Amino acid sequence: MKKLATLLGLLLSFSSHAEYGLNFPDPVTDIGQEIYDVHMFTMWIATVALIIVFAIMLFALIKFRKSKGYKADQNFHKTWFGNWAWVLVPVMVLGVDFWIAGRAQSTLDKFWDAPKQNCAHENADAKHCFDMNIKVIGHQWWWEYEFPEHGVDFNGKFYPIKVESRPLEEEDASEGNYLRDVDNVLVIPVDTVIRYLNTSVDVLHAWWLPEFGFKRDAIPGYILETWATVRKEGIFRGQCAELCGTWHAKMPIVVKAVSKDEFKQWIESEKAKLLAELKDANSNKDWSKDELMVKGKKVYDTMCAGCHNVNGQGLGVAFPALKGSPIALGSANQHIDIVLNGKKTMPGWKHLSDVDLSAVITYERNAWGNNASVVKPADIKSAR
Amino acid sequence: MTTTTMDIAHDNDHHDDHGPQKGWRRWVYSNNHKDIGSMYLIFSLVMLILGGASAMAIRAELMYPGLQLLEPDLYNNIVTNHALVMVFGAVMPAAAGLANWMIPLMIGAPDMALPRMNNLSFWLLPAAAIMLVLSFIVPFFPGGGSQINTGWTLYPPLSLQVGMAMDFLIFTVHLLGVSSVLASINIIVTIFNMRAPSMTLWNMPIFVWTWLVTAFLLILILPVLAGGVTMLLFDRHLGTSFFDAAGGGDPVLFQHLFWFFGHPEVYVLLLPSIGVLSHIIPAFSYKPLFGRKSMIGAMILLASIGMVVWAHHQYTIGMSSAAVSYFMIGTILISIPVGLMKFNFIATMWRASMTFEAPMLFAISIVAMFVFGGLTGVMLAIVPADLQYQDTMFVVAHFHYVLMPGAVMALFAGVLYWLPKWTGNMYNEKLANWFFWTSLIGFNGTFFVQHFLGLAGMPRRIVDYPVQFTEFNFISSVAALIYGLSHILFLYLVIQTIRGKGTTKAKSRSWKGAKGLEWEVASPAPFHTWDSAPTVDAEGEIKQK
Ligand SMILES: [Cu+2]
């Protein structure tokens, strides 16, 4: 089949990107390897069974045809075989079934239940513990990652490191990676047992990296646990695997597995960035309109443009234009209210900082020819 | 009009042995099983064309990476519509059409037991079809809300976001459900009460048996789906939170309700077709069906196990390890009844004297392709591996390999097999052969390569895909075009046979090896048949004097 496909591929002059796969990509996690082995095991059994059935059918088709003068055996179903086939066949099938099920079950036992304890815990079971957690949060249509154990303390409160991972447009994506590239990748250390905690803030998604060997749903109101230890450094790509609405096809997942040292460095630089942002957001600085517009454009283009379009003209019937919209031009309170609390498909944005919110609202009220009042961080604070 | 006059008019109908009413009344007021059967079949053909057109649109969009023809929401809308139209509009009505036509003929009954309800079951369908089409097009009108972008599974919370189109769809599901439940009741009552007195359940034809089991399945599962979508409706408009986590509800609950219906539903689609094959294969093998009783046992077992393994569609929702083990083992065990059925078909061909008319060609290829689809089904049942397969093109390939041969092609085979009985004309064998070979090649070309796509990591239900999936998608789309176009041959062939131009007349026993009561009546079957019940022997044949 591979030959045939290659031939067809050549015929159709697709030589430019002939990197199509025929099977699972090589797994990079321990669990992925187990899963790959079970997959190959069942596939071989299925292939052999298929060949046997086809061979028998082919033999019958060649031999037992009227055109060859073969006379039908009217009593075949009354022979001992005919009388007992209903026992023989199920017993044989049952045997194969248990063979497959037994193998699958033993794999399942190895990994189905994610570890409950941190390895750092003094009486943790060393064989079944995790080194760190990563929270995976599905959004329409991007992924958010959170490191509950890594973060900074600020004003007596703990702020975990977060990575917002949004798809890149075709022109920004790296070569050959259209639909497979994001602005911020998730960085993880190799040889570390990581427990992934999947959830979602809106609809169902599924977090899937083929190289990891599994996918797991992200369900609002649930936290689903999986765990994996990546054994190889590199960049691994996957995408959302549960239909989640309009841009379901555009929810890439990119994970960069690095050495433990490199991971430490990365975490430290993220911490520094986070601390600077927190300081910025909490200073009682008086933001000018121009500063707000610059910041607002950044927030808008990453958070809002997916639905409202970069030019503010909306998308189709479902996503309204903000350019010339009565809300964007009308009272600031109403505008703040809809952005904070959302409305139907429009998500609420309470989790953004006062500065970001005032910036994006100001931007919406004054970009693309709109001309309305400026909204200051203090306005957001009082509206919360 | 009062009830009394209606009754009198009805009485007149029955007492003289006249033909059908004239003009449109014949169809709208029909309570004749043959006319209603024909209407079901024509309806399903129309829906097949609609569903086929949507499949063509999907494959056209996926021919190359990038967004060419369809906006993402329109694409998802079409994906949703394709499934619903094919399952509820094409396959189920076609099987119901065969049931209407053939069950009374096969069991020696003059008609269905509840002819007026039969009329209602059919006429609910066009109403449902209109609602379904509306659910597709309302979003294109001002104020029509967003399109249905959930797929046929209608999972909340996504389905709670959709505009009013979803309400149209929920109503469609209700209408379809009522129609199917009424039809099922009718079939059960007919089979239990209207058989020729000498026909026992054991020597009842297998096609009738498959429909008996199917009808019970439908009555058990449809109310659950209806309940699920009603809860969805309540969540959407009445402020309940069955499926909304924010209100204390559970989005996963809907998945359980849906698949409690959805998994047995595939047996609803498959069983009547297995019944059809159980008639075709012996007829062209010129020997009795191998393992008649085990066939009946297998279908009952299949329906029973099929009712309790639904959650294998949901391995990724984080069930407990005990739950996934149970669903995995239960699902693998499905291979026992299915394997037995396929074994019986092959054993029927063993030491037979086969001829290869088009229905038989279909039957043989169906058995082969179904075995393949069944084996990928066993692979999918394996929980660890399914964590990789789930929601990929591998699944799409798998279920098309079971449903297309197992349900759709077998229905084509059945239509070809019984067309001489319905029309009095033999279809054009050469044309039928062309149809068989083009659709066989087209089908396999379309779906075989999708296995590779899925294994290599392409999710299903995506409107655009990364470039490394281009080659196989291109092959799949080209083959899909061949497959789609091949159905024009079928359409032409059916019309040609009905009109009787350039065809030969059919004998009452149109196929030499065909067995069963339906071949005792003239071809075409007269408007009324079996006014007096025949007497049958142990093989289900008319008793020779
Ligand atoms: Cu998603």
Image: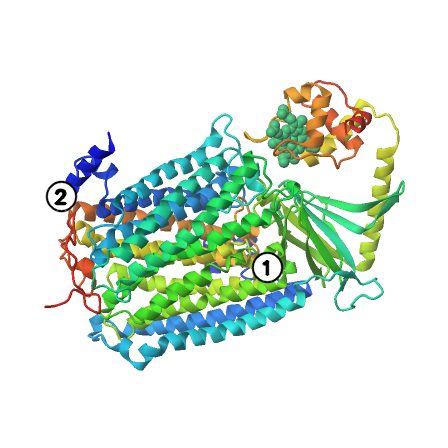
Residue B328 location, x and y as percent?
54, 64
Mark 2 and mark 1 residues within 8 Å of each other at the beta carbon: no
- For this orientation, the residue located farthest to the front is B4
Residue at numbered disc 1: B387
In the figure, is residue B373 to the left or right of A344?
Answer: left
Query: Residue A10: x percent and y percent?
Result: 48, 56
Q: Gap between marks 2 and 1, in whole Å?
A: 64 Å
Dot 1 falls on a residue whose secondary structure is: helix
Q: Chain of mark 1?
A: B
The amino acid type found where label 2 is placed reads His
Disc 2 marks which residue? B15
Which corner quadrant of the image does residue A330 belong to? top right
Which chain's residue wears label 2? B
Q: Is residue A384 above or below residue A26?
A: above
x and y, in percent, of residue B334 in the image: 46, 65
A97 w.r.t. A13: above or below: below
Residue at disc 2, secondary structure: helix
Q: Nearer the viewer, mark 2 or mark 1?
A: 2
- Up/down of A250 relative to A225, above or below: above
The dot on residue A249 is none
Identify which residue, A322 or A342, lies in the foreground.
A342
Q: Amino acid at mark 1?
A: Leu
Q: Quadrant of ligand 1?
A: top right
Q: Quadrant of the C terminus of chain B?
A: bottom left
Do the dots labelled 2 and 1 sit on one chain? yes
Colour scheme in use: rainbow
The x and y percentages for residue A236 are 67, 55
